[in-house]
Image (spheres, grey):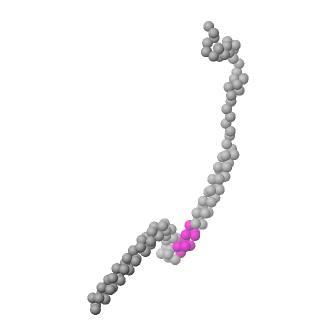
Amino acid sequence: MQNQTISIAYDTIEELTEEILPLKRQAIALEAEIGPLKYIAELIYGDEAADYFDTAVRWIIILLVVVFDPLAICLLLAGNTGIMQKKRVTFMTEEEILKDIEIDEPLKRWFADGTGRDGN
């Protein structure tokens, strides 16, 4: 009778152990996801972090919004200012470059010949 009770207890323990393993895996996965937030909550609230975890998460979200939204706006303004102040580059044609330069007649013939020679 006592051996049968022990055997039933061991079977029950084995069944419960098999049921608890997937739950332990899920708990480990969840802790890995929220681990950094858990440490921040412990930093802020100390040993009572488990009671204030939701509050700590809210404060972290508010902190991220307060810090990064103005930064995003500044980046948008800087980008738009840079685009507005961008100068257009225009290239001068050969005629525009040479219009104010006087070239002697022999030199003009030398260039006009196309060979770079003066015809001699």
Residue at 60% x, 66% y: name it: 62
Residue at 48% x, 67% y: name it: 33
User: Which x, y percent locates residue 74?
Assistant: 64, 54
Residue at 56% x, 73% y: name it: 55
**Where the C terminus falls, by quadrant?**
top right
User: Which x, y percent locates residue 90?
Assistant: 68, 34
Residue 58 part of the magenta-drawn span:
yes
User: Which x, y percent locates residue 6?
Assistant: 30, 87
- Residue 89 visible (yes or no): yes
Name of the residue lying farthest toward the bottom: 1
Q: Which residues are magenta?
A: 52-60
**Residue 112 in the image: above or below residue 4:** above
Q: Is residue 32 left or right of residue 68?
A: left
Can you tell which quarter of the image residue 69 is in? bottom right
**Where the N terminus falls, by quadrant?**
bottom left
Residue at 42% x, 71% y: name it: 25
User: Which x, y percent locates residue 31?
Assistant: 46, 70
Of residues 33 and 67, the one nearer the viewer is: 33
Name of the residue lying farthest toward the top: 120
Of residues 60 and 33, the one nearer the viewer is: 33
Q: Is residue 100 left or right of residue 22?
A: right
